[in-house]
Image (cartoon, helix red, strand yellow):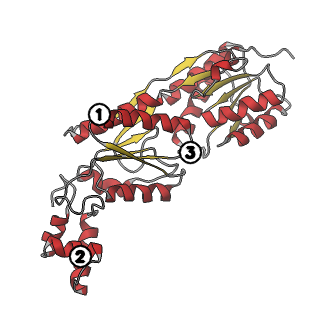
Amino acid sequence: MAGTRRPTLADVAERVGVTPKTVSRVLNEDGPVSAATREKVLAVVEELGFRPNLMARNMRVGARDSTVGLVVPDMGNPFFGTVAGGVEQVVRDRGLTLLMGSSGEREEAEHALITTFLARRISGLLVVPAAGSDHRFLRRERESGLPLVFLDRPGSGLTADAVVSANEEGARAGVAHLVAHGHRRIAFIGDRPAQLYTRKIRQRGYQKALQEAGIAPDPALVVTAHDPYAAGVAVGRLLALADPPTAFFAANNFATLGVVPALAEAGRRDVAVVGFDDIPLAGVLEPGLTVVAQDPAAMGRAAAEQLLARLDGDRSRAVTRTVPVTLVPRGSGELRPAKR
């Protein structure tokens, strides 16, 4: 069968040589069907990659549902909530409904959620890949015309559209800002695992800024912390070094939410901080928090617009769109190293 559209129940029936009603009986376990026929139907379902339309069994065969699926790693992260808002703003104007679920940053949960969405015969799919996730299982869906866009992080094992932030450039600018204010001992607190795309690319920007300033990187100043508590613990450990950092680059919003309270608790108002990604009330802290601000709403809108373009028939090569970031000086990144 030509790989120009998604297989339908009628395609399965034709391949097996039975009626669509018989295929439906097998899939729904509804009505008498011989064991041999059942085996043939299930084999062809697997071969064609057919996914039953759970939401439209009584509608015409092969019709798509008027929904778009979005998979994120963490519902509790405000960044992804804002991304979802950007997506919904665009798809709603086209009469589509957004379905959203969380993978918990686990590959198996992500795959299960995607499979559930596909069973509803969604019109398009947006995915923020979980760390280490492999997306080769979506190749058949891509070949049969499913619009797919990866968000925040590129997919793995599959060529598809993606929308990401200017991660390397932003980290480089944030660390260079600290260097420009006299800092040479700059700690990096990044996400877990170290192989996560955003962590890896932002750390590369950190390293390039140090290299350009002629500063030898110190592995002791690079730590991993996925949540605010771990980031706070890391701050205490780094400040206890014989040659402690005079500045911190927090490579994600959760790291920032650990760094800032830990410094306040330690009474260290002399340590500079630049965070990657803005956080609520950053401007009212004392001093205000300097950040490399992403634009998650713009990322969501760009991803949704790309998905709709594919839905409308755009068959050009896959593209990766990079959404700019902005350095926002508010005081914490402009502190100079304390004299020793």
Q: Say above or below: 122 vs 318.
A: below
Sequence order check, earlier mark of 3 and 1: 1
Label 3 near label 2: C-beta < 8 Å? no
Between disc 3 and disc 1, the foreground one is 1
Please rate how many residues cluster around mark 1, counting C-alpha atoms within 10 Å: few if below 14, some from 14 to 19, many from 20: few
Q: Residue at x 25, y 86 (%)?
A: 35
Q: Quadrant of the N terminus?
A: bottom left
| Residue 131 visible at all | yes
Could you tell me which secondary element the residue under label 2 belongs to?
A: helix
Label 1 near label 2: C-beta < 8 Å? no
Q: CA distance from mark 3 to mark 1?
A: 37 Å
Question: Where residue 195 is drawn, which disc sits there?
Answer: 3
Q: Position of residue 33 (x, y in %)?
A: 22, 83
Could you tell me which secondary element the residue under label 1 belongs to?
A: loop
Q: Say above or below: 28 vs 208.
A: below
Residue at mark 2: 25
Between disc 2 and disc 3, the foreground one is 2
Residue at mark 1: 93
Q: Say above or below: 245 vs 308.
A: above
Residue 328: name its quadrant: top right
Q: Residue at x 81, y 35 (%)?
A: 236
